[in-house]
Image (tube, rainbow, N blue to C red):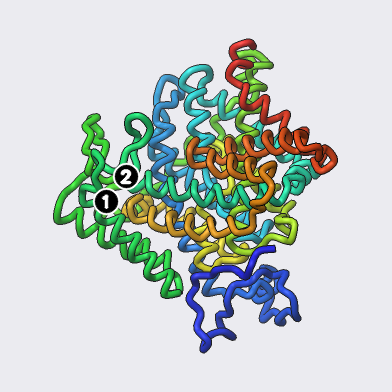
Amino acid sequence: MADQPRSIAGDTPADVVADAPARPYRSEGPRAKPRNGLDRYFEITARRSTVTREVRGGLTTFFTMAYIVVLNPIILSGADVDGNSLPFASVAAVTALIAGVMTILMGVVGRYPFALATGLGINAIVAVYASTQLSWPEIMGLVVLEGLLITLLVLTGFRRAVFEAIPAQLKTAIAVGIGFFLTIIGLADAGVIRPGNPLISFGDGGQLAGWPMLVFVIGLLLSAVLVVRKVKGALLIGIIATTVLAIVVEAIADIGPRFGADGAVNDRGWALQVPQLPDDVVSSPDLSLIGNFSLFGGFERIGVIAALLIVFSIMIADFFDTVGTVTAVGAEGDMLDEKRNLPRSQPVLLVDSLAAAAGGAGSVSSNTTYIESTAGVADGARTGLASIVTGVLFLVAMLFTPLVEMVPSEAAAPALVIVGALMITQIRNLAWDDMSLVIPAFLTIALMPFTYSITNGIGAGVVSYVVLQLAVGRRRAIHPLMWVIAVLFVVYFALEPLQQVF
């Protein structure tokens, strides 16, 4: 069972009563009496939190993942709709809308601090299919079907059963692996690591050069100091302060983006958003993409079997990304039980499944629970109230997209690295004296960052766990559903040759 949480909210003895340290709501001892209906519904006091902390955590989560409003249109810009590329402004607005609505729904129904938005791994997959095999409405129709299928699995209890069938060793490894995964995302967003020869390179030509890199380093050191000093809202303060610094640096040095609109590359430019004061603060949202999907068009174009394989690949990625994210965020907030399961997870899984279908119906790709939620949890969030705050900010972002674009990835990346450091402390809970458990855990941890995929890490861990438990004669120790999961992952990893056959 995990130790008490490492909250970085920065409580002092004088404010213990008013802003008590975050602890799991399952803590032993009598529960404090709820102060009002809001407190009672979200169990704010029972989970040893406060409204102030929940708001702060919701703000932190939003600023850590707000980049998706800009990044999703960039990734999907190559998709074709009736001979034209997807409109950037509409993708941005609908991305914010779906993320806002589903995150609020997660807060109200799931009552946990999980935020949702378009899944980066999934939207990259569907963008490839849209550019090679299917039109955009057709691939979005398959995403809607995938979401409805997962929703059916939730309603039958199968998805929760799978979640609980995964052994504690692998669940702990998932949390640790996601810690490394978050770290590599942060380092890549900041440009500290980049594609190179043969694999990755360090900075620009082996050097940490350029003003954006300096901004990231200062932001990382500032956030680290605030965390170890236990300053309340350390990550949020770090993001805001680093953004201000970035705006000042850009105003003076006029650095510009790393990748220009004309195809020019500036290796020492800003990775995504250029931090500058916008000309306009408010923009009118374009929601014209909503409903632009063809539910069964993909089956007519490429055939039933080929279409089902695409649905299967998206479903596996969506299904197990959520398993990993919920486990990791729950572990960071010490919200898991002694079996490393999230109590009352059914509503969480239901909202996550509906979000997948909603993303397809909105024509912005499947939405899923975001691992960046750990940033808000690390800053003190423990209840669904934080998700409502994050969701409302996403809805506001539809109108204030220019303000969201002010926050460069170099300012948000330090928070991801710090959260990664917090999460890898779960490694102390792993069993190290049994190689049949160590190897699956190691593969789970290693493949997440190295393949840039939570699903690949979980799949490698599950398959190797089943094989090695058989090898040491522990067949009875394998949960029956683990056999099913292992077979599904074998099919998933062999998907490319299967698609070629069919």
116 or 442: nearer the viewer: 442
Residue holding disc 2: 191
Q: Secondary structure at mark 1?
A: helix
Tell whether 469 sits left or right of 206: right
* Residue type highlighted by circle 2: Gly
Tell whether 252 sits left or right of 94: left
- Give yes or no for contact between labels 1 and 2 (Cβ–Cβ under 8 Å): yes
Residue 158: x and y in percent read 78, 41
Which numbered tag is attached to residue 213? 1
Q: Vertical placement of 303 versus 214: above or below?
A: above
Which residue: 68% across, 57% down?
Answer: 109
Q: First in sequence: mark 1 or mark 2?
A: 2
Which numbered tag is attached to residue 60? none
The image quadrant of residue 47 is bottom right
Which residue: 30% across, 57% down?
Answer: 217
Residue 85: x and y in percent read 40, 26
Tell whether 216 sits left or right of 299: left
Which residue: 21% across, 48% down?
Answer: 210
